[in-house]
Amino acid sequence: MEENVKTVEATEEEKRIMKDIEAVFERFYKGKKAYSKGQFYKNEFYLRTDYALVVLSKKKDILVSFADHTRPSYAALFTLLLDDIEGTNLFICEDYKTDQQGSMILGEADGWSTSAIIWNEKDRYYSMLREKVQKIVIRKLKKDADNPSEG
């Protein structure tokens, strides 16, 4: 049985944030479910499209990494829409390389891509996705709502 945002073991706020992330991509892909639904794994939410990888961390930080072929205008649009999600900070990470089919390249030295991963190897797959959002380029921290005098 496949999980969706409603059935994962997360707080109501985390579920709302996950739905908001999916809504960004549902609008862009005009409701094509294959490109707009994420997965919840080990208390983190992952959404991977052909343009971007989005990870919602345990701290409710949105980490986004764009494929190297993503148009700057698309990256800007996704960034603006993701930045509007309440209760999160946005981190833009280094772009990731893709092969000619658009799959993520696991190791530039050996040329392996995500298309070579056996999909029942969840730990390996999600570890690879998490590595793609390690190098943060831009931090977009929002004001602390509890302390409005800062800023």
Image (cartoon, grey):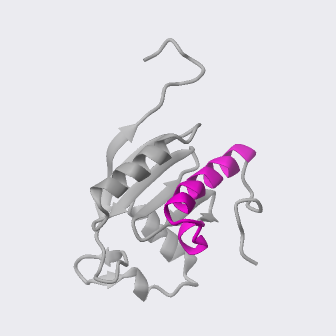
Residue 5 shown left or right of residue 46 in the figure = right
Q: Nearer the viewer, residue 94 or 123?
A: 94
Q: Residue at x 28, y 55 (%)?
A: 72
Image coords of residue 11 (percent x, y): 73, 47
Which residue ends up furthest to the front in the rendered image? 30
The residue at 35%/78% (across/down) is 102
Quarter of the image for residue 80 reads top left
Magenta residues, start to end: 12-37
Would residue 40 appear left or right of 78 to someone viewing this image?
right
How many numbered discs, if any? Answer: 0
Instruction: Give yes or no for residue 111 being in the magenta stretch.
Output: no
Q: Find residue 132 and report its horizontal and vertical position in percent.
A: 38, 63
Rendered residue at 33%/43% (across/down): 138
Q: Nearer the viewer, residue 142 or 41?
A: 142
In which image quadrant can residue 6 be found?
A: bottom right
Whole-percent x and y of residue 51? 39, 66
